[in-house]
Amino acid sequence: MVKKIIMFISLLNCIGLFAQSAEEIINRVDNNEVYDSIRYEGEMLIRLSGKEYKKSFFSYGKGTQNSFMEFTNPDDEGTRYLKKDGKLFVYSPDTETVMPITGHMLKESIMGSDMSYEDTIDNDKLTVRYSVKIIEESELDSKNVWVVELNAKKRTESYPKQMMWIDKETYSVLKAELFALSGAKLKETRNLNFKKFGNRYFPTESEMRDLLRKDSKTVFKMIKIELDVDIPDSMFSLRNLER
Amino acid sequence: MDELKTKRGGLGYMIKIAYRNIYRNKRRSVLCMTAIGLAVFFIVFMMGWIMGMYDSVVKTVLTFETGHVQVFTKEYFAKEDFIPVQYPVEFENGSVDEFIDEIGKIPGVKAVLPRIASYTTLTDSKVKHAVLWGLHIQKEFETNVFNLKEKSNGLIKGRYPLENENACAIGRKMAEKMGVTIGDSIPLKAVSSQFSDKFWNPEIVGIFDFDYGSVDTLYIIVPYERLQKILSLRNKAQKIILYLDNPEDSEIVKSAITELIAKKGNSDVIVKKWQEHQFIDMFKQMASIYVIVFLVFIIVASFLIVNTVLMMIHERIKEIGMMGALGMTRLEIMSVFFFEAVLLSILGSFFGILVGGVVSYAMSLYPIDVVSLSGGMEMSISNTIFVKFSWLYLLLSFIFGVFVSSVCTLFPSMKSAFIEPVEALRN
């Protein structure tokens, strides 16, 4: 009987330890990926049905609620996106008008990529949005990883469930799978490159596949990244969007 | 003697006897004629209905989808259901505009009309998705009649957008669904040929009704140049539609364009005739099935006439014996019964085409609402169709009715010829 009680207490301890560890791991992931502010130039390489499209842009971000992005490649030159207080707006040079992106539009892909508008909106810390648990310890690309399951705390979350493969050494997310409420896998992302900024390993190149699209993937590259720089609030204004 | 034999046993004499026999049992004769008449009526009506549908499909496909000849790329054709703009016609040697000019000079070509269709997402609307349809509006209406029911350009309110105007015209059903009218704008997003998100906000200047469900509910008509620019299709064409002076010249024109494309050196560009459209092809294949259906119908009706002939033979068995005893040959006896049945078929078929003709003619003037009948058809067909009236259909149905019923009565009539006179008289 005493043996059984000891075993039960040990088991509870294990679960407790795992839960604590999972939180800690995701905290470390957040520390790697969430920034106060960012400025960078980027590229999006979209491959769809054997064709390839390259987009270039520069972007600014402040906190989790404000960001600004302007495309510079010839076909999209002047197209600007603004996320202000979590709401998304677009300026199109063809019509010179600002339009909000709301409702079902948020599910649409950005510039034909595998990424949707709502993927850009959800920037809050994972620990705030998801409850986490470690599923197993494993190996991915010859790296030791934790396989972590994240379940959304709110029903409004775009992906109610995520699975993440987190590097034990750097606390970087190497791979993530995003699921719908039905359990169907919707998207798969892989972080291909990281850059070290002080103690953080920041992902600079990632690949996303929208599994609902056939023969499709998007590689997202960040170049000339500057983290935690001073960006004026006027950058994230509607006036700046339609300037 | 020979003269007397000819007179008494000749064809005319047999037909006369057969004609008189019709009146011996009027009720049975009327019943028999009614069955044949109903079958022939059905054939006349169904031929008119099917050909009306076929005409509607052809006109709709020609007007809205294919023209008489269309030019696009292999990749576009493979993904045509998604109307992609990412696989346009373009040439390294020369521009698409030059190509359009050149094909316009091919003898028999009436008009060359590049068109763009692209799916779009509507923001802030009850209707989430629609199709942007870029047309050379003025030229299109000079070439085509878009409302096949009213034979008009379909405009019910306002006007169509001018070339390069930041404006659009939408279908009546779409306007009702969205709760918008002239003067309102439609904020939308389209994806360009370079996979760029293009946001646009055209103002509604006109509302149309083409009597074609999918276009009236889904399509937003915009000026071609404007859409071409927005979708990054400058010097490219998603699809080029050709209208000919004579639609049957499509093969000749197709060959001429194919030669021109070969000179330009882009093997990805292909040419299709209107006859190759899936619905037209499907209807042609279905024609043989309809003949079988008609045949079954008339054969079923003919069972009544077969039965009538058999009853006549049993009823007149003594008479047959007497005819044989008086010297009538087997062929003569048989022809009396055969002609009686043929006369019933002729009369029945005549009444069939008479009623069928009147009904078809009336329905060729007043269209039938197919949508309310079918609950919405996913086909290239207008909402209303006209039953096609044709004298040829009446003639064909009459011949078909008489021929099939006559063939069916041939064998029971032969039975009368093999009845022994002595046996018949004894009965």
Image (cartoon, rainbow, N blue to C red):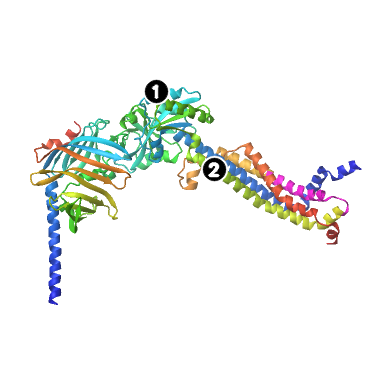
Q: Which mark is residue B285?
A: 2
Q: Chain of mark 1?
A: B
> Whole-percent x and y of residue B388?
57, 38
Magenta segment's dominant SS is helix
Q: Which mark is residue B283?
A: none
Residue labelled with disc 1: B98
Q: Determine which quarter of the picture holds residue B425.
A: bottom right
> Whole-percent x and y of residue A89?
22, 39
Q: CA distance from mark 1 to mark 2?
A: 39 Å
Please state the extent of the stretch shown in magenta in the rendering: B325-349
Q: Chain of mark 2?
A: B
Q: Earlier in the sequence, mark 1 or mark 2?
A: 1
Name the image quarter holding the N terminus of chain B: top right
Amino acid carrying label 2: it is Gln
> Whole-percent x and y of residue A62?
13, 41
User: SS at mark 2?
Assistant: helix
Q: Circle 1: is it few (<14), some (14-19), or many (20+) Cα within 10 Å?
A: few
